[in-house]
Image (cartoon, helix red, strand yellow):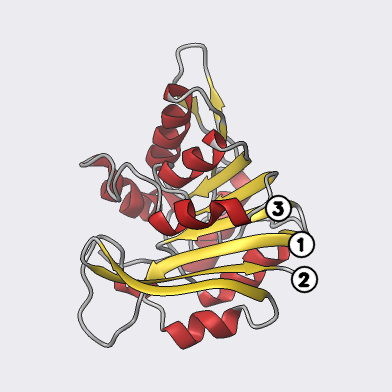
Amino acid sequence: MTARFALSIFCLSLACSGSGTPAWSAPPSALSGYEAVTGDSPDEDRSIWDSFYEHKSNVFGKEAVGFLKENLHRVRKGRAFVPAMGEGRNAVYLARHGFQVDGVDLSPIAVDRAVELARSQHVSVKGIVADLTNYAYPLQAYDFVFVSLFYMEQLIPKFKQVVKPGGHIMVYVKADTGKPSAGNTPDDFLVKNSTLKAAFKDFQTLSFKEYRDHGVDVIAILARRP
């Protein structure tokens, strides 16, 4: 599977009917704008990630990332932003620990599962179906940003800009060791430790860890915005 992210701004809202079925909408202008840029349809690219999730649940497991669990006590509670949320294991963990969570993912299937997982655990996660490359990132709106198994260098400044002064950002990604990788994440998201450190040189690094997680080489950082 290839990972392509020049995708549509597509659908920016999630609503639920009385039966609990998600209802999606996409502005016509967003669809035509996408086709002008890529020459494809938004449904075609969205299906890449939908097919990733539709044949198996809990693709990345049920438990939140260990690095998140180990370091959450260092993060002040408040509003949390979880881009590339997937099926919501980390977003729901944050909600269970008192955060008001906004989670974004391109796949409606993944977002639907995340919202349902939150409901099943009696917490709330706001699920947003959107393309992160075209997302309207607010300035200094969140106390915490958590990014897991997703890395696009051009989006890191966007993720940083939403962090409030004194707020935190955590990134957990597969490490680029120069060897073939394992696991479900596309190799497009492999990151060198020097690259991750440099991306947050203007933040205060509170923790940086390189380790093997379920047989996969990973690196993780927790940084604080001055």
- The answer to whether the residue labelled 1 contacts the one labelled 2, judged by CB atoms less than 8 Å apart, is yes
Residue plotted at (44% across, 83% down): 193
**Position in image of residue 176 (x %, y %):** 34, 81
Query: Label 2 amino acid?
Result: Pro
The quarter of the rendered structure image containing the C terminus is: bottom right
**Circle on res. 201:** none
Residue that mark 1 sits on:
166
**Residue 123's image quarter?**
top right
Residue that mark 3 sits on:
143
The quarter of the rendered structure image containing the N terminus is: bottom left
**Position in image of residue 223 (x %, y %):** 62, 69
Label located before the other in sequence (2 or 3): 3
User: Dot 1: what SS?
Assistant: strand
**Residue 97's image quarter?**
top right
Residue plotted at (53% across, 67% down): 37
- The answer to whether the residue labelled 2 contacts the one labelled 3, judged by CB atoms less than 8 Å apart, is no
User: Dot 3: what SS?
Assistant: strand
Residue that mark 2 sits on:
226
Between the C-alphas of marks 1 and 2, the distance is 5 Å
Query: Label 1 amino acid?
Result: Gly
Q: Neighbour class for label 2 at 10 Å: few (<14), some, many (≥20)?
A: few
User: Dot 2: what SS?
Assistant: loop
Q: Is residue 86 visible?
A: yes
